Amino acid sequence: MLWFLPCCISYGNAELPLDVNKQGNLAGYGNLRNRRLDDTDEHKESVKIRSTGDDQSNPRSPPGESAGGAVYVRWGHHSCPSSSQLVYTGSAAGTNAQDSGGGVNQLCLSQNPVYDSPVAGVGSERSFIHGVEYQITNFPQLQSKRWYDVPCAVCLATARFAKLIIPGTNVCPSNEWPESTEVT
C-alpha cells in the first residue's frame, strides 16, 4: 500500500480566485507566517526590514514578508528537493481508523510543538492524533524501515505559485510540471 505520492505544482498564468494574489497568498497574508527562523543574517535583515517597514516586494503582504511560492508537504523525507526551500521538518500523524471524530487528513507535525493552554484529562468526544509508522510486510527492500516513524518536510517552491496534489498517480495533467516524480 502506498500512503504518500508526489505533488504536481503548476506554472502558468491561470486566473486565480479574487482572494488569492498572483504569488499564491491569501489576500492580506504572507507565506510562511509560522516559519521558524534561526539567528542568521537573513533573519536579522528580516527583523530590520520589519522594524523600518522598507519591504515593498508585495504591497498585500504584511511588512517584512516577501510573498511568492507554493508550500507543500514532502512525505517520507526530512529534506526538500533542490528546487525548494525547507520550511520545517516533522513527523506524519493522523487519527486512528478505529477512533471516532477524527479527520481523514494526514498532518505534518512540527518537531518543536507548542502546547498552548492544554486541557487536562481525557475527553471521549475528542479524537487522538497518532504518529504514522511504516508497517511494511510485502516489500523486502523496505523491511529496514518497518515500525519507523514517517518523516515529512514542509517545502516552499519559490518559482511556483500554485500546487495540486494528485493521490495515486505520478503523472500531471497537461500544462503542469512535476515538482517531484518519485514515489515515496
Image: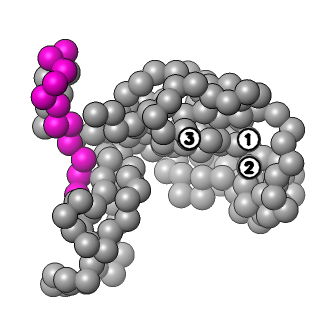
**Which residue in the protein does label 1 denote?**
161
Indicate the quadrant containing the N terminus: top left, top right, bottom left or bottom right. top left
Asked if the residue under mark 1 is in contact with the one under mark 2, i.e. CB atoms within 8 Å, the reply is: yes
Dot 2: few (<14), some (14–19), or many (≥20) neighbours within 10 Å? Answer: many
Residue 24 image label = 2
* Residue 160 image offset from top left, x and y in percent: 71, 35
Asked which secondary structure carries label 1, the reply is loop
The residue under the point 23% across, 59% down is 97
- Marked residue nearer the N-terminal end (2 or 1): 2
- Vertical order, 104 against 119 (above or below): above
Q: Amino acid at mark 1?
A: Phe
Q: Which residues are magenta?
A: 130-141
Other residues around mark 3 within 10 Å, as few (<14) / some (14–19) / many (≥20): some
Tell me the tag on residue 85. none
- Asked if residue 159 shows in the view, the reply is no
Quarter containing the C terminus: top left
Dominant SS in magenta: loop
Percent across and percent down for residue 50 are 72, 58
Left or right of 143? Residue 155 is right
> Quick one: label 1, few (<14), some, or many (20+) residues within 10 Å?
many
On the image, the x and y values in percent for residue 93 come to 30, 53
The residue drawn where x is 80% and y is 64% is 19
Q: Is residue 147 visible?
A: yes
Q: Nearer the viewer, mark 2 or mark 3?
A: 3
* Picture disc at residue 165: 3
Q: Which circle's residue, 2 or 3, is located before the other in the chain?
A: 2
Magenta span includes 133: yes
